[in-house]
Image (tube, rainbow, N blue to C red):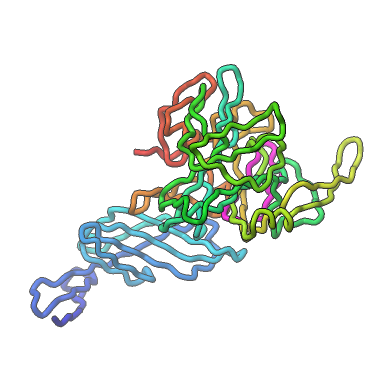
Amino acid sequence: MKIAKFILAAALLGGMSVQLTSCSDDENPVAYYPVSVTVNLPEEIASATVNSEEYRFKNVSTNEVKTFTSAAEIELTEGLYDVTYTAHVTMPNGVATTMRAMQQSVRITAGENTIDLTAYNTIEADDLIIVEVFNCGTTNSTGGQNRDSYIKLYNNTDKVIYADGITMFESDFSTVQKYEYNPDVMPTHVVVRTLFTVPGDGTRFPVQPGEYFLMCDRANRASENSFDLTHADVEWYDESQVASQQDTDNPDVPNMDKVFSYSRSITILDQSQRAFGIARLQVPADKFLEDYAYTATYQLVTAAGTFDRTKDGCYMVPNEWVLDVVNVSPHDNYAWNVTSPALDCGWSYVALNSSDKTRFFKGMRRKMLYLNEAGNPVFKDTNNSTEDFNPRVTPSEIELQGTAIDAAGTLCTTRTYDGVIPVK
């Protein structure tokens, strides 16, 4: 079958350029209509270099996909399309990012068509990301704190990723106290005081695209004003050296491997002033503890004078091992980020200040951009926690289980993707 393509003159179609494809044995040629696409870019991309871009159109009825590398010559047949825009970009600081935009059920009709897309800046992730930090916990009616903190990871990619070997860490440096540490390793390392690793041989914990991985303090059943965490994927468990402070172990939930913790008793997430992150250690745990200890000197300035101090008892994780990190500080007491800007250009919060009693029942959740073609949330990831996270929102587990949102026991009746965008 021979194919012939031709353009009808503008005079025949009122000045509109239409491309037709006809076959020698087909008397019904297919008409292609011009499509003008405008992509609205985020401000941070204004001075960036666009290395490549792709416009992808999937016909909802036929599942046929057409791709274009430029907006200049897009022509499509009539129909309903899902539109995806992807551009690989290099920022002025050399960081490679990916811009994405998506619009579903776009109708292409006879005539000229215009599509407006809003692009989002995301890091090209090849591993799990932190999608939620719930570090402040809940309280019961008498004011006692429940140990129900957790960190939730997410597979923001289109491939299966195994959580085996991912190490959760907490920074040693505080975001509310800035010191000039010597040596200054922040450009190359994160100084940490806690490391717990997901066990497994590399195939134990598969995380499908669009799925979550839940790491919690204690995988307990619900208590007063709290929620059930027995469905957690893993828990971090401490064999306490303090007789009066013992941890609780759920034998049905795998324990994370303890690499190191500053605590002699039980490890609890800091409630306001640390960075939380995940990494994949490139050496065995014992080798890490041997080679990556950190000792530094700094000056403590007080009203009584200036004093030389030594910091030790912590470790440093090379930045290239880090998968994701979130700097956290009380809103009114932020002093500095305790990681390199290459890892996080911003920070997020739950507490309003260092003594905020309203921090309980709230967390930080990564912003959702859109639902992809599989119906999975796509979350924002620009390595800037200020832009990427919704601060001080209702945790996902409280929403999912409809448990208390305050000490009075008021039950949650909302359900969202990210603490803001409602699930319809």
Q: Is residue 265 visible?
A: yes
Quadrant into which the C terminus falls: top left
Spot occupied by residue 84 in the image (x, y as percentages of width and height): 36, 59
Give the quarter of the image for residue 359.
top right
Does 326 lie within the magenta span? Answer: yes
Residue drawn at x 30%, y 57% is 82
**Does 57 appear above or below 20?**
above
Instruction: Give the left or right position of residue 194, taking residue 95 as reference.
Output: right
Secondary structure mostly seen in the magenta stretch: loop
Q: Nearer the viewer, residue 261 or 416?
A: 261
Spot occupied by residue 270 in the image (x, y as percentages of width and height): 65, 37
Does 251 lie within the magenta span? Answer: no
Query: Residue placed farthest to the right in the image?
Result: 305
**Does 354 appear above or below 173?**
above
Spot occupied by residue 186 in the image (x, y as percentages of width and height): 72, 55
Q: Nearer the viewer, residue 111 or 186?
A: 186
Instruction: Give the left or right position of residue 397, taking residue 339 as reference.
Output: left
Query: Residue placed farthest to the top in the image?
Result: 142
Quadrant into which the N terminus falls: bottom left
Spot occupied by residue 231 in the image (x, y as percentages of width and height): 45, 37
Q: Nearer the viewer, residue 157 or 384?
A: 157
The image shows a total of numbered marks equal to: 0
Which span of residues is magenta-colored? 322-341
Give the quarter of the image for residue 349.
top right
**Does 203 appear above or below 399?**
below
Residue drawn at x 45%, y 53% is 156
Residue drawn at x 37%, y 55% is 102
**Does 28 appear above or below 396?**
below
Q: Is residue 330 visible?
A: no
